[in-house]
Image (cartoon, helix red, strand yellow):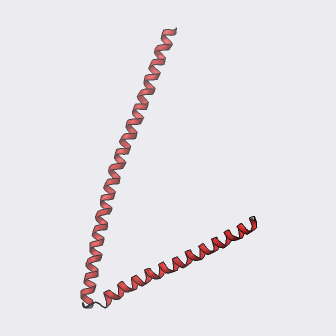
Amino acid sequence: MNLSKLIEQKKREKARKENRKKAKTVAIGLAAGSALGAISGILFAPKSGKETRDDIKGCANEVSDKVKAKAIEATETTKTNLNEAKAKIKDYLNSKKENTENVSEEEKVEETTEV
């Protein structure tokens, strides 16, 4: 009984792998077809080549500007978060240092009262 279950399990695993491979192939084909369709649409559009190139250049510049703005924003946010983290760490360390100093003073007081 166990051998037949093992064989069935192996068959199912093999079928799943084949299905995944087919799905992956279909997805790649779909992506490639979409890309080719988009490129064909741009190249065979009723606009002249110069107008199309200008449109592409304009879109590329817009995307570039947006990416630069987001990068600057992310950099500023990171700097702010870093400074806040440094301040919190410094405060934490100072509070621990103060607690340690207070404990040391209390120990000194206890030592002098014991003598």
Could you tell me which quadrant the N terminus lies in? bottom right
Residue most extreme to the top: 115
Q: Position of residue 25 (x, y in %)?
A: 52, 80
- Percent from the top left, x then y, of residue 75? 33, 57
Q: Is residue 12 above or below residue 48?
A: above
> Which of 3/81 is in front?
3
The number of discs equals: 0
Q: Which residue is painted at 37% across and 86% down in the image?
A: 37
Quarter residue 34 falls in: bottom left
Point 25% across, 91% down: residue: 46
Which residue is nearer to you in this view: 25 or 75?
25
Query: Height in image: 111 above or below 92?
Result: above
Residue 85 lies, in percent from the top left, at: 38, 45
Which residue appears at 30% of the width and 72% of the height? 63
Residue 2 in which image quadrant:
bottom right
Q: Is residue 112 above or below residue 32?
A: above
| Relative horizontal placement of residue 6, taking residue 69 as reference (left or right) | right
Q: What is the x, y in percent for residue 28?
A: 48, 79
Position of residue 51 relative to residue 107, above or below, is below
In the picture as drawn, the residue positioned furthest to the front comes out as 1
Q: Quadrant of residue 20?
A: bottom right
Image-based side of 57 in relation to 108, left or right: left
Pick the front one: 52 or 89: 52
